[in-house]
Image (spheres, helix red, strand yellow):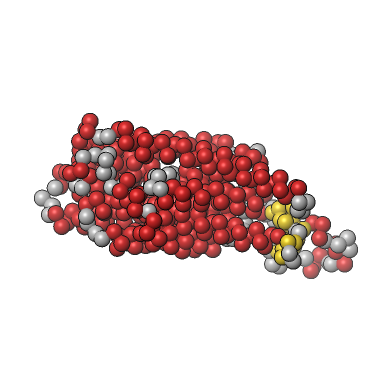
Amino acid sequence: MMGVSMLFIVLFVTTLFVAYANGANDNFKGVATLYGSGTIDYRTAIALATLATFAGSVCALLVAQGLVESFSGKGLVPQDTAGSVNFLIAVGLGAALTVLLATRLGIPISTTHSLVGGLLGAGLMAVGAEVNFSRLGGAFLLPLLVSPFIALILAALLYRLFSHLRRRWNITKETCFCVGERREFVPVSALPAEAMTDVSMSDMALTVADNRECQQLYTDRVWGFQLQKILNLGHIFSGATVSFARGLNDTPKIAGLLVAAQALDVRWGMVAIAMAMAVGGLLHARRVAETISHKITEIQHGQGFSANLVTSFLVIFASKWGVPVSTTHVSVGSIIGIGTVTGRRNNTMIGGILMSWLVTLPMAMVLSALGYNAVSLLF
């Protein structure tokens, strides 16, 4: 038999396991458009994502208490079951294993979706028909299903608006290529006619790259400042905002596992979760980063900025009102919206991601049900 104190330790470790898996699969999603558009490199992007996510996790203590309650299981299963340690351990195991498997395959899935599956699977094993399916549909599944479509529509509309304003204001966008020892992007029209005759081949270096290295840059100035630099700063800020919103939205969901069992003060729990998320992102984010940054659609600077604005708005709004949306669903939905407008979306990859989203919930259900049986045998 396993003592009660040992079970609390197992629950704490399981919660950190969920946070670690969350960081590995989710941390990079806020800065994916920055990496995909070539605004910053991978190392800078993951460092920015880690810092901004940690800040969001800390701020969740103040503004996201509603999500803690939602993901503690209260209202979904009876009160005594929601506070049961073995029930919560099973929920965490099911969610974490599902997210880690997807991360290994480089597939961006939702930790929120996995937690919902874990709650349902463990709940069915614990109380059977007493699971409140009406709350499951209205409070959990509906926001998860609707949010990516809202993000897709808003991102498409916002990017069309920005494109219309650019054309109306005659803002110049040019394709650039790299010359010299430094990878400095030079607009084609900015090269004087004599450039190719006055410079010998020994003085020039040619960079050969794939299509995603081909950049479209804005060459005009606004109030004396280069428009491209303003856009880059705005894009970086928007990426940090998405990562901040992700920490704000996801941390309290995971903390709900600890709060329900009264295993640890919520403040210390969120700090520990934030640290585990950071480690998971730093060590294992690369595969998912490549998928979401480069394999869904080609992303240019303005497109990435548009997608990030929509994602950060929707996730922060949902966090404030305790609505359990998925940052993954919203972020990927925004990027698909951009790809729909440009006509460059990868439908094969998008189909694979959507299929993984459909599999996420039942897989987490099965794993959490198995986990509940295993933990019950030990306790």
Q: Quadrant of residue 324?
A: top left
Q: Is residue 6 visible?
A: yes
Front in this rendered view, residue 266 or 371: 266
Front in this rendered view, residue 1 or 78: 78
Apparent side of residue 208 relative to residue 260 in the rendered image (left or right):
right
Apparent side of residue 367 relative to residue 244 in the rendered image (left or right):
left
Please, is residue 226 above or below residue 151 in the view? below
Q: Quadrant of residue 251?
A: bottom left
Front in this rendered view, residue 201 or 320: 320
Numbered disc total: 0
Which residue in the rendered view is the most extreme toward the top? 129
Apparent side of residue 124 relative to residue 219 in the rendered image (left or right):
left
Apparent side of residue 153 relative to residue 260 in the rendered image (left or right):
right
Residue 301 rendering spot, x and y as whole percentages: 64, 53
Front in this rendered view, residue 379 or 328: 328
Residue 326 rendering spot, x and y as whole percentages: 43, 45
Tell me which residue sits at (22%, 52%) in the image.
Answer: 261
Please, is residue 145 above or below residue 279 in the view? above
Q: Is residue 22 visible?
A: no
Tell me which residue sits at (60%, 57%) in the image.
Answer: 235
Residue 375 rendering spot, x and y as whole percentages: 19, 46
Residue 255 rendering spot, x and y as whole percentages: 31, 54
Tell me which residue sits at (32%, 36%) in the image.
Answer: 135
Tell me which residue sits at (17%, 56%) in the image.
Answer: 6
